[in-house]
Image (tube, grey):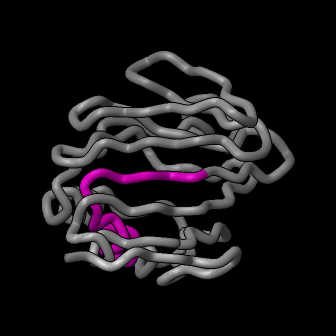
Amino acid sequence: MASPLIIRKGEGKKTIMIGPDPRLFRITGADVDGRFDFIEATITHLQGPPLHLHYEQDDTFFVIEGTFTVQVGDELFELHAGDLFCAPKGVPHTFANVGKEPVRVINIMTPGGFDRVLEDFASLPAGPPDPQVLEELGQKHKLAFVGPSIPMRLGLV
């Protein structure tokens, strides 16, 4: 039988930096038999990944603070505190902070194991990633990169 988890404010299993932004894994899949990851994240100005899809994971965001821009397919949406976004596996999506103030979100990945993906991405050198490296990481972690980031798409970087 699994044991209950109590994780106090500010605590977590690990923090992974993606560029300047922390992803605090409050719970990793390893803590809950692989069922999900619970991630608290801060997204700063013009940060966000390329358009991508997960072959085996649903990607859910709940906005705590700020204005969060998400893209599903070709459509852009602005989310605000209290809004929720879920991209089921196989759906191309991305997100970014195109505003000046940091955005705070909760990100739940189902099933878990996304910490391993972000650890690999955090180890990449600074700057735009090599497309071949992205392709290899995508194959390793069962995801695909299918377009530019929102800031690139909007000509902001």
Camera sees residue 6: yes
* Residue located 29% across and 29% down the image: 91
Q: Nearer the viewer, residue 124 or 22?
A: 22
* Residue located 33% across and 79% down the image: 3
Q: Position of residue 17 (x, y in %)?
A: 56, 75
* Residue located 44% across and 71% down the image: 27
* Residue located 63% across and 32% down the image: 69
Report whether 74 appears left or right of 19: left
Report whether 145 appears left or right of 1: right
Q: Which residues are magenta?
A: 106-120
**Is residue 1 magenta-colored?**
no
Q: Position of residue 139 (x, y in %)?
A: 14, 58
Say if 24 sits above or below 67 in the image: below
Camera sees residue 144: no
Q: Nearer the viewer, residue 21 or 83?
A: 83
Say if 24 sits above or below 42 in the image: below
Q: Position of residue 78 (x, y in %)?
A: 67, 25
Say if 63 sits above or below 83 in the image: below
Q: Position of residue 7 (x, y in %)?
A: 56, 77
